[in-house]
Amino acid sequence: MPKDSGIGASPKRREDLRFLTGTGNYTDDINLSGQAYVHFLRSDVAHGKINGIDTTAAAAMPGVVRIFTGADFEGVGSIPCGWQVTDRHGQPMQEPAHPVLAQGKVRYVGDAIAAVVADTAEQARDAAEAIELDIEELPAVIDMKEAVKDGAPKVHDDLTSNLCYDWGFVEENKPAVEEAFAKAAHVTTLELVNNRLVANPMEPRVAVGDFNRATGESTLYSTSQNPHVIRLLMGAFVLGIPEHKLRVIAPDVGGGFGTKIFHYAEEAFCTFAAKALNRAVKWTSTRSEAFMTDAHGRDHVTKIELALDADNNFTALRTDTYANMGAYLSTFAPSVPTWLHGTLMAGNYKTPLIYVNVKAVFTNTVPVDAYRGAGRPEATFQLERVIDKAARELGVDPIALRRQNFITEFPYATPVAVEYDTGDYNATMDKLIEVADFAGFEARRAESQQNGKLRGLGVNCYIEACGIAPSNLVGQLGARAGLYESATVRVNATGGLVVMTGSHSHGQGHETSFPQVIADMIGIDESMVEIVHGDTANTPMGMGTYGSRSLAVGGSAMVRATEKIIAKAKKIAAHILEASDADIELKDGQFSVAGTDKSLAWGDVTLAAYVPHNYPLEDIEPGLEETAFYDPANFTYPSGAYACEVEVDPETGKVTIERFAAADDFGNIVNPMIVDGQVHGGIGQGIGQALLEGCVYDENGQLLSASYMDYAMPRADDVPFYQVDHSCQTPCTHNPLGVKGCGEAGAIGSPPAVVNAVVDALQSAGKDVTHIDMPLTPNRVWSALNS
Amino acid sequence: MYNFEFEKPATIADAVAALGAEDAQALGGGQTLLPTMKQRLAMPSKLVSLSGIGEMQGVCREDDGSLAIGGATTHATVAAEAAAHYPALADLASHIGDPAVRNRGTIGGSLANNDPAACYPAAALGSGATIVTNAREIAADDYFQGLFTTALEEGEIITSVRFPVPEAANYQKFVQPASRFAMVGVFVAKFVDGVRVAVTGASEEGVFRWSEAEAALGASFTADAVDGLTVDAAGMMADIHATKEYRAHLIGVLTKRAVAAAS
């Protein structure tokens, strides 16, 4: 019987009512008295020297308040990078300055040159057109391998080259890995591209800066996944505003997918300008600006080699990756191709020796940073593609080859620094075979053949590291932040609770799922619990939402705070019931004395906490409010197996996804419906990456896929109904809920399944096709069929 | 968007008069023009809406059997009202853009714009339609003159389009995955006196007739008749979605499918 409340139930998402009825409060809904509007004049060349900016005529245009240029930001800090990677030789990465407005040079199409603040948005835009620019166009570097050649134009003149870092992991393993390759019975090699993507949240970015002259406090409203992180980065490193004079509010946010983690120059600009002008300043990104300026995702070029012994055991793995950083280092950019990618290269397999080399490269393109999965999709894609290729080369069943090499004993320390606590990869594979109906595949293939179509079946596994992360560990790895999470649980006198969480919800449904946990712990109705998030003024310092960390880390903080609440409430109950603390039991919202019929309702105790007439004042304080910070002991390791069935039209090369099945192990699950939705969304984005989405710059750095006319997002008719199962559950051993996280799995696990399926379809027609780069457009598939 | 004047006349004559102003621009459904203006890539001094002109609305079967469609008729109306008379045309209209586009966009607007990837030019050329303007009648063969270029003079309005109704016809569209415009679209129409094949989305010169296929299909209206015929890739468009060769290849595939669907 499915539960109807608490952990394991699927109540409908309470936040959807306001989202779906137009009553949400998004940043663009915020309009402050007297606010002005900013329009950014952006570079239309990818690389150029700024010889002059003449704002004379523009400044005289109607409604113009002030025009800012890079010169106004001399003495203001650089947009900081939150992670420092150390290279193979022990040297820190090259880290260029990133001014709020361009100084001296523009480095990508969309780089902001000037900012016009005016009474209306249209006036600001009109005036921006009247600014006279003298920009000397310079040769641009777009291709990563070209960018690192001697003599290539330099994106940053003060750096030694366009190489941000050359990272080796684990560097000490390199000789042993090379020796294993020399001894291998078989080596499979694959060169591939992990295509550059644009995140495209439904809500474009918005920033509203405000300044209160009376209190000296600055406020930024922003479309952020992590308002405290923005407050720290912008306050401490860019604008020099102490945190007690800076408030960051991220109200309802319409999707993030990673690209709203980062601190952007527009946020700093609006906060800075509001103070300079003593007037609120608002910026709303157009969709065109979003394509040009939101941090992009992925963009790796990789060569991967897998060594096997004569019995088909994986003996070593070696990868060589170029990772695009774009023109500046976005907040977490350096960590994505390194610690979020190299550490996952073991996958689900007991490969004993692994060496990962990553060259991070500056190019004249918009910065690249985390996008749903961040590093883990890139790792999974390479690994699961090369295993599939190896199985074909060896003439063995790809599932059998995987099973043979699965890690089966836990905990398992990989050769790439992480320790998996739990998992059961055979169980998820068994479940996949069942839910995907492998038994019926040959019949379906025959039916497709009758219709002139090629049918293919692709399978892959994945593992990811979620719940980022133990602060001491990430500190050693170069993070310039801790990655704990926080919660304050405030119980009101009449028994209702407010949870102020450092996690941020921008589509994940925290307002529904977090109360389910508390309701179970106390035995009260979920409607008695309210979730508050997104405002640094009324939530404890929190690190925000990304890396599928909210329930595993933020939820754990909430559990810890609630445990403190319950412990204190039991003391109050014990006092009133004249019993020992240890004898008090809490069940179904009732405190009772073990072995007696004496009891008190939850509300009686909460009232006593605030009306402490009969209260142990000598032992405990009045009130019922507790805060906890939770720093995880390890990452969590969700895993699973995915299967995709495609049909390929051999005449046109068009691929259609006929079936898609996912068997995930997320550990314990709070709200199965929300988990289904997260997996559906992730698979949709994975299918988008595999078949449709490709962000393309031309050789001069012009963005060719700059709108929905050329950037193909997946639509409802591009995806099938999914078979999603998460009944395989090996709970996480180190967080109180035993949860692992589910937000990114779909996007991580699905691209290789799609590509494996298309290759299978083509091979079934006798074509010797071993790989096609994503997106698998009809043209590319047709070309492969006819090559 | 820059400021502009706006007029919504009730007659063709008033519309023509209003379009006499310098840099005035006719507005059909606005599905191309308005996004262009929002991007500040067009700055007409005045928009003259054609949507209030009753005599430019609707679908009507003429005495000679042809189907006349008012220039300001939306795609959705064509999809609904042409279905009984010219199913292939109605089907084409029902697959343009999305419901919002189909409820605003008009046949006259589409043909006047002559986007090289639009659907209606293939129908008009493939049917041998007549473009009727406030001033004259123009045969489709003379009307389409290249990318975004037509025989229309400055200020000339498409008041209606007259389609001869073929014995059989079909339109096959292979969509560009992002825009869902035609990456290649082929309209095949079989008349008593011959077959017309019009191709959109593919050529650097815009919509064109594939005369070799027309000849072969005129002799035998079967998909097999197209076997062995190829289109020269040299004149095809290339972009991030498709090469010239791929587009040329698709023309053959879609022509065969259109013939198979029509027969």
Image (tube, coloured by chain):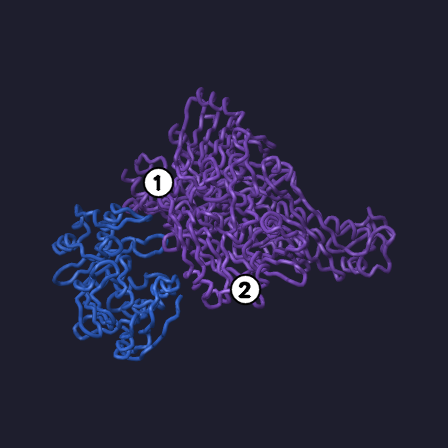
Q: Secondary structure at mark 1?
A: helix
Q: What residue appears at the point 67 percent right and 44 percent down from the top-left corner?
A: A630
Q: Is residue A746 visible?
A: yes
Residue behind mark 2 = A29
Sooner in the amino-acid sequence: mark 1 or mark 2:
2
In front of the other: A165 or A250: A165
Q: Chain of mark 1?
A: A
- Residue flagged by tag 2: what amino acid is it? Asp
In front of the other: B66 or A784: A784
Residue behind mark 1 = A761
Of circles 1 and 2, which is in front? Answer: 2
Q: What residue appears at the point 50 percent right and 25 percent down from the top-left corner?
A: A174
Marker count (numbered)? 2
Q: Secondary structure at mark 2?
A: helix
Q: Where residue B11 sits: x, y (%)? A: 28, 79
- Residue flagged by tag 1: what amino acid is it? Ala
Question: Image check: A624 left or right of A415?
Answer: right
Q: Where residue A450 sits: x, y (%)? A: 30, 45
Q: Chain of mark 2?
A: A
Give neighbour class at mark 1: few <14, some 14-19, many 20+ (Cα, 10 Å).
many
